[in-house]
Amino acid sequence: DTDNNVQITIEDTGPKTLSLGTASSEGYRTFDIRGTYMLSNLLQELTIAKQFKRKQIVLDEARLNENPVNRLARLIRDSFWPNLTRRIDGSNIEKVGRDPKDWTADPRPRIYIPKGAPEQYEYYTRVAQEHPNMRLDVQWLYEKCDDNEYVRDLNQAPGLLAVAMKRIADTPDGKPDFEGLPFVVPGGRFNELYGWDSYMETLGLLVNDKVDLCENMVKHFCFCIRHYGKILNANRTYYLCRSQPPFLTDMALRIYDHMKQEPRALDFLRDALLAAMKDYHDTWMSAPRYDPESGLSRYVPGGMGVPPETEASHFVHVLQPYADRHNMTFPEFVKAYNYGHVFEPELDEYFLHDRAVRESGHDTSYRLEKVAAHLATIDLNSCLYKIEADLARCIRIYFNDRLEIPAEWRAKTHKAEYETSSYWDRQARNRRRQMDKLMWSEEDGMFFDYNTKLKQQT
């Protein structure tokens, strides 16, 4: 590795042959590792062994000559997925409960529990009492947890949001005990359950028959919809007002196809569909995301002020001129603006669209910049059309065209006690008609986003 970039490539000028002792001769005879590819694989194998504190390993020649596609597929299946798997419970809350984006003076592990999960509040309180050095802060979450001012004030004590757990054997002294359901994160530095990333991960996990992990992520999403009102960008307090592109029905159906012989499969699908209906009505078909004039939906998350998951200094180029205008230091202005002590409609508009871009999952994109909250995008409305069509088909095929809606799953904006396929067929037809009318360009032969403020394609 002559250029010291921790890789063996054709750019390196070192020797391309390395002699290693064979295991069968106890090192007396040698075998030549030849060429860039074999040497790079050897370096990778040795690095992995070193991470496991191995002093010596025995390698088959086939491992170093492995077909590149097969090698990557094997590493994804056996190494990458396990390395990206997380869970949230008392065994690791000290680590995952700490937020690297906690800019407060006293960052500490903190978890918020929804009022509908008292068993988790009792569990985490016990964990905090048994491990005082952890300094775990366990808090109840306000019932109206997506109120803009409340979410803003939570930034003074940001924390993790509880997700689904399973009951396990009681503790030796007879107290209820729980364990977090494992899930997959989109990158090694994350510990949170993310929104549409989880759908993309599911596509790969199912290829490797890791159905249990996929099932868990749907259960987490159902928990979030039931207790937080939506599938969140991620389960941190500063994401309580923000969702992400909806894929729940497609995700659940793909998983169901891999587990439909299991006794629990239909109950799994039922819960996912009930959650998807509630999310559909209360998130995507309610103000401010739903535009009643066009009949289309937009990314319009709530929130106030500067997005808290980003250091305020990220927006210096935007905010500094306003701070100068008010004769304030930069930190003084950010605080004053966040708490409504100064009024700047232009900034309100800027951050409205900034939050919408983040909810869209397309951060950052010039297509959406400074206009995202006004756009009924073709991708969001296509996802919602897919949900409507999925719900119609599933209710008709799997639930004899009548799906009962328990009280806890009834949407605030849609109080039906049961659903039939005809309702969702009608919803899908209406959306398709509006998309064809407002988003299709016959001249260009393609669909465009529709600006609901300017009432034109863009």
Image (tube, rainbow, N blue to C red):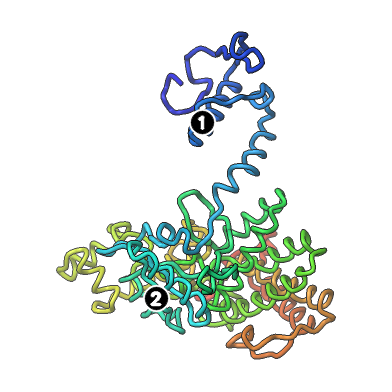
Residue occupying the point 55% across, 50% down: 84
Q: How many marks?
A: 2
Q: Look at the picture and state if 303 lies above or below 25.
A: below
- Left or right relative to 295: residue 354: left
The answer to whether residue 450 of the structure is visible from this angle is: no
Q: Earlier in the sequence, mark 1 or mark 2?
A: 1
Q: Which mark is residue 139?
A: 2
The image shows residue 274 at horizontal and vertical percentages of 68, 78
Residue occupying the point 79% across, 78% down: 395
The answer to whether residue 404 of the structure is visible from this angle is: yes
Report helix, strand or loop for mark 2.
Answer: strand
Name the amino acid type tagged 2.
Answer: Gln
Q: Look at the picture and state if 362 lies above or below 63.
A: below
Report helix, strand or loop for mark 1.
Answer: loop
- Left or right relative to 345: residue 293: right
- Left or right relative to 108: residue 393: right
User: Could you say which is closer to the camera, residue 307 or residue 292?
Assistant: 307
Residue under pointer 1: 54
Label 2 packing within 10 angstroms: few (<14), some (14-19), many (20+): some
**In terms of image quadrants, where is residue 148?**
bottom left
The image shows residue 380 at horizontal and vertical percentages of 61, 67
